Image: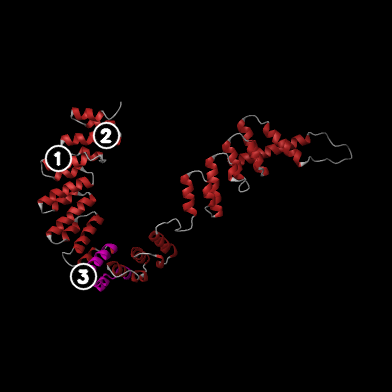
């Protein structure tokens, strides 16, 4: 629509000039009409724009005239800095970015030049640090910004699809699995990762048996099971070993389902699996599955603190331990979900939960949920009005 208005304005200008020309005295008889020199016409067009009524009318007139004649010098005749820059950018790349009036427009211009030239040199002229860094990141050759040798090697390996750029086994392992590169797996030093990589690439967990020792075979089995998402592979590891039990724990945590913990062996390992699951996921209900009562209490307390959830404290036996659990969470200085406060089963600690969270959420209305008068006053004291 804007282009149509500009063209209409230019046409109007030309029509007006045509009328002016038609109004000139007729040429003497016997002589042909002598057309005005182009420079005279241009001067009249500029005068017409200069005499337009209103700032916007003059700016629009000069904009149309500049674009029609591709004359950047007319852009500077406009009053609005934004329109001047818009006009100048229409003349790109003939007009240098430095001639733009607004810094944001100059930055955009330099960014555009950098893209066109596919060079980071114009990025240095951008005034905004954030935009300048983005310009450099976008236009820098792949991996050149990586300063860590290992990270750079991994970046180049993936960029060039060649594991030989890897500088460590972690890179060779991830590249081998991600790209299905058996050769990358072979390049890994002797150990569980080497055989796990080969097993995943070949889709054959039995390759872990090629490791030289049983612990390495078991660790390989755990890596393969988790990588392939097949819990059945865990059973290939030695029963009761840390790797087999760790395999079940990992599946429980990854799937946010404590059921795999029932496969851990012996009983103490099952308890540890439920404990680790509750701590990692915040699903503290799994603590009830722990046989050892002391470990069960510890499970609720650790899960509560690790996940900023005072509700887990409800599983702790009544008495000092439960109070310590609530205090360890509510008075920790960490943010707690308001819905947790609403379901705390101890009235005093519920009040403290609302009182502590009100200033953290900058929500004075939470103080109204506090029942105890002294605690409510302490809560309201956090707000000036």
Residue 208 is a magenta residue: yes
Residue 111 percent location from the top left of the image? 53, 48
Residue 74's label in the rendered image is: none
In which quarter of the view is residue 338 placed?
top left
- Whether 227 is drawn above or below 52: the answer is below
Residue 205 left/right relative to 372: right
Residue 151 percent location from the top left of the image? 39, 59
Residue pictured at 20% horizontal, 48% vertical = 303
Residue 379 left/right relative to 22: left
Q: Residues within 10 Å of mark 1 (few under 14, many from 20)?
A: some
Question: Disc 1 versus disc 3: distance between alpha carbons?
Answer: 47 Å
Question: Disc 3 versus disc 2: distance between alpha carbons?
Answer: 56 Å
- Whether 114 is drawn above or below 197: the answer is above
Q: Residues within 10 Å of mark 3 (few under 14, many from 20)?
A: some
Kindly indicate whether the residue at mark 2 contacts the one at mark 3 (C-beta within 8 angstroms). Answer: no
Residue 364 percent location from the top left of the image? 28, 31
Residue pictured at 52% horizontal, 48% vertical = 124
Q: Is residue 296 visible?
A: yes
Residue 330 is a magenta residue: no
> Considering the numbered disc 1 on the image, is that residue within a helix, a strand or a loop?
helix
Q: Main secondary structure of the magenta part?
A: helix
Q: Nearer the viewer, residue 7 or 254?
A: 254
Residue pictured at 58% horizontal, 38% vertical = 83
Quadrant (top left, top right, bottom left, bottom right) of the N terminus: top right
Q: Which residue is mark 2?
A: 358
Q: Which residue is mark 1?
A: 323
Question: What's drawn in magenta, residue-wise?
Answer: 199-227
Q: Is residue 8 visible?
A: no
Q: Which residue is mark 3?
A: 214
Residue 245 left/right relative to 108: left
> Considering the numbered disc 3 on the image, is that residue within a helix, a strand or a loop?
helix
Q: Nearer the viewer, residue 221 or 54?
A: 221
């Amino acid at each position: 629509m804007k282009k149509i208005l500009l063209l209409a304005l230019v046409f109007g200008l030309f029509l007006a000039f045509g009328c002016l020309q038609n109004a000139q005295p007729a040429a003497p008889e016997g002589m042909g009409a002598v057309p005005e020199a182009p420079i005279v016409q241009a001067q009249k067009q500029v005068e017409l724009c200069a005499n337009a009524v209103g700032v916007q009318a003059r700016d629009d007139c000069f904009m149309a005239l500049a674009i029609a004649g591709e004359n950047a010098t007319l852009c500077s005749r406009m009053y609005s800095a934004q329109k001047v820059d818009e006009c100048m950018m229409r003349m790109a790349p003939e007009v240098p970015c430095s001639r733009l009036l607004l810094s944001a427009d100059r930055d955009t211009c330099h960014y555009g030049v950098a893209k066109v030239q596919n060079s980071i040199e114009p990025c240095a002229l951008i005034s905004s640090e954030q935009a300048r860094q983005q310009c450099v990141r976008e236009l820098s050759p792949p991996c050149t910004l990586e300063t860590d040798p290992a990270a750079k090697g991994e970046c180049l390996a993936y960029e060039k699809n060649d594991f030989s750029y890897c500088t460590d086994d972690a890179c060779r392992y991830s590249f081998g699995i991600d790209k299905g590169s058996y050769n990358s797996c072979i390049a890994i030093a002797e150990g569980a990762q080497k055989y796990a990589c080969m097993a995943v690439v070949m889709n054959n967990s039995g390759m872990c048996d090629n490791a030289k020792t049983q612990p390495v075979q078991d660790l390989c089995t755990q890596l393969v099971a988790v990588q392939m998402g097949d819990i059945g592979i865990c059973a290939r590891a030695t029963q009761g070993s840390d790797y087999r039990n760790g395999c079940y724990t990992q599946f429980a945590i990854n799937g946010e389902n404590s059921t795999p913990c029932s496969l851990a062996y012996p009983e103490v390992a099952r308890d540890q699996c439920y404990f680790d699951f509750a701590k990692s996921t915040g699903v503290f209900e799994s603590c009830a599955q722990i046989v050892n009562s002391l470990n069960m209490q510890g499970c609720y307390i650790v899960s509560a603190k690790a996940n900023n959830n005072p509700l887990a404290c409800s599983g702790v036996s009544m008495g000092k331990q439960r109070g310590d659990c609530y205090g360890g969470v509510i008075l920790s200085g960490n943010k707690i979900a308001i819905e947790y406060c609403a379901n705390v089963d101890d009235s005093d600690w519920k009040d403290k939960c609302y009182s502590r969270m009100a200033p953290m959420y900058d929500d004075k209305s939470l103080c109204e949920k506090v029942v105890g008068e002294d605690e409510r006053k302490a809560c309201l004291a956090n707000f000036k009005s």
